[in-house]
Image: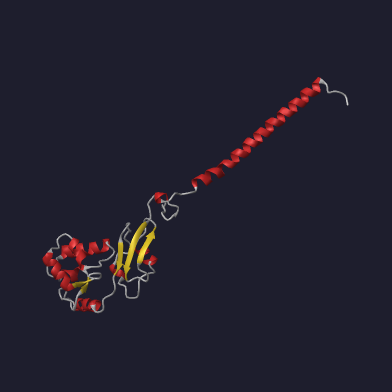
Amino acid sequence: MGSLSRSQLIVYGAVAVVLLLVGARWVRSGDAQGEPAGDVAYSGPVASAGGEATGTLAVDAEGGADVVVDVAGAVVNPGVYRLPAGSRVNDAVQRAGGATARAEIEAINRAARLTDGQQVIVPERVAGAAGSVASAAAVGDATAEATGPISIGTASPEELDTIEGIGPVTAQKILEYRDQHGGIASIEQLDEIDGIGPATMEALRSRLQP
C-alpha cells in the first residue's frame, strides 16, 4: 500500500477531531443525567435528635416535632405514647387501644390538640350519677343535690353550682380546666383554678369524686 497523500491525512485528522468532540459531548450528557439521582440521595436522610441513629424523632409537614403523652384512666392499654405533631386527644385514646366499656368518654374534649408531656385521663362512668341528674331534671329542680358524690369528669355547670362556694363563673372555669387537661384525675387539681380557696376545696372534696 502506498503512502497517504497530504490531503488524505488532513481528512483523516478532521474525522478524528469530530469523533473526539462527539465523544466528549456524550460523556458530559451522561454526567448531567446522573445528577438528579445524586441530589435525591443526598437529601433523603434525616438526622435524629442529639445525633442518635434511632430515627424516633419525626418532623411533620408543618415542621413540628412528635409529642409524647401519658394516656391513663379507662382505656384498654394505658401508657406513654409518641404521636405526630398536631394530633388530638382522640388520637391518643385510640393509640391506647380505645376507651373501655366503663369509660365516660363524653367527659373529655376529644378534639383538643395534644401538647408534649400532657396527661390524658379518661374517667370511668360512676354508677347512679346519671340517674340522679336525670331525676332532678325531670322534676325541674336544678338545685337538687344528687345522691352521693358527683363525678368531676361528668359534672355539668348546674351540678357544680349546687356545691357551696361554687357559682356559675367558677363552675365554668372548672369545665374549661377539665377540657384543657383531657380530664381531671384528682380533686386536688382544682386548687390550681383561680377563685377556689381552702374553704371551697373542703366543700369540693365532700361533694365530688374523680
104 sits to left or right of 50: left
111 sits to left or right of 193: right
Residue under the image location 19 percent in, 64 percent down: 190
55 sits to left or right of 182: right
Q: How many marks?
A: 0
Residue located farthest toward the top when viewing the structure as drawn: 6
Nearest to the observer: residue 53 or residue 128: 53
Residue located farthest toward the right when viewing the structure as drawn: 1
Q: Quadrant of residue 70?
A: bottom left
Nearest to the observer: residue 9 or residue 57: 57
Q: Is residue 55 above or below residue 20?
A: below
Quarter holding the N terminus is: top right
Quarter holding the C terminus is: bottom left
Residue under the image location 77 percent in, 22 percent down: 10
**Residue 58, percent across and down?**
42, 54
Q: Is residue 127 above or below residue 3?
A: below
**Residue 62, percent across and down?**
39, 50
**Residue 203, percent across and down?**
13, 70
Q: Quadrant of residue 89?
A: bottom left
